[in-house]
Image: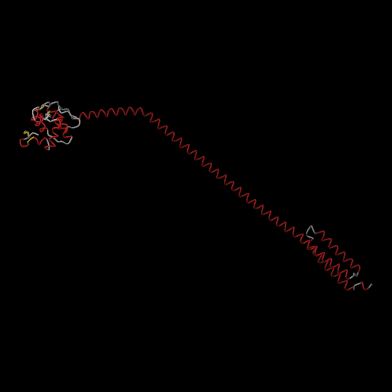
Amino acid sequence: MSGLRISRTKALAVTGALAVTGAFVATGVAAHASSVNNHKAAMADAAAVSTLKAEQDKAGTTPQGASEADAASLLAQRAAADAANRDASRAPVATDAAAADAAAKAASDKAAADKAAADKAAADAAAKAASDKAASDKAAADKAAADLAAAAKAAADKAAADAAPQWSAAAAAAKKAADAAAAAKAKAATPAYANNLDGWIKQAVAILNANGTPTSYNAVYQAAMHESAGNPNAVNGWDSNAAAGTPSIGLLQVIQPTFNAYSLSGHKNIYNPVDNIIAGARYAAERYGSLDNVVAARCGGSCWVGY
């Protein structure tokens, strides 16, 4: 029986070791006791250690192999339980923190996205309102301008219509007055010539001077007196011109071909004394320089050279 027992000292050492082991286990259990999920397990471990210690103290002696094996087994079990408890307690905490962070980030992202969408919607609404107002203002301005232009045109048309009869009457009166004034002026500008040699000469000289053939009254008078004795109907039927079939005719005795060549527009009658003077004077001016040159200056303009 003594062989199966251990010494008192060795038993005390084992008991101390168990006590120390129990203290470490109790400390680990107490540390995890803060976790609600592991509280009961920690209390059970502490009770088991206390019971084992009490039994050993009561027995006083314990088989050495059994005590060491039990202590080692108990220590291993407690270490495994402690690690499992730590992992079990830490994993949910880490998982919960990550989930909380992800949820917080998702909530923040959603809030930012919602705010951006709300801001954009507000900006779009403000821009549309401004565009609609600008379009409305332009339409109103265009209508006002069109109405003003239409009113102005209507007023102008009415004024023109009202004034038209008055302007027509005034224009007719003004035209009539202008025509009368022109007729009076023309009549005043055209002198009345006597239907005789004096009047014929004066009228012909005025026309010749106006058309670039300056001719004196005396030169025409001398030519008329020497050529036809002042007879506008005189015809020479005996000279060489008559023999050639072109007798000399009229106041200055001009043959028909010469008359046709030197007459002026509107003066084409060879028997008209004014027309006859005009053609004869223009012919003398081309051949002798002027009708005055035909009248000899040396005899005071009374000598006739002939032409």
Q: Residue 112: x, y in percent?
A: 63, 51
**Outermost residue to the left:** 299
Q: Residue 120: x, y in percent?
A: 59, 48
- The image quadrant where one finds the N terminus is bottom right
Relative vertical location of residue 280 with respect to residue 117 in this rendering, above or below: above
Quadrant housing residue 128: top right
Q: Residue 43: x, y in percent?
A: 83, 61
**Horizontal side of residue 237 vs 61, given as left or right:** left
Relative vertical location of residue 149 with respect to residue 27 in this rendering, above or below: above
Camera-side residue of 170 and 189 = 189
**Outermost residue to the front:** 244
Colour approach in the figure: secondary structure
Quadrant housing residue 98: bottom right
Quadrant housing residue 26: bottom right
Q: Residue 177: x, y in percent?
A: 27, 28
- The image quadrant where one finds the C terminus is top left
Camera-side residue of 47 and 84 = 84
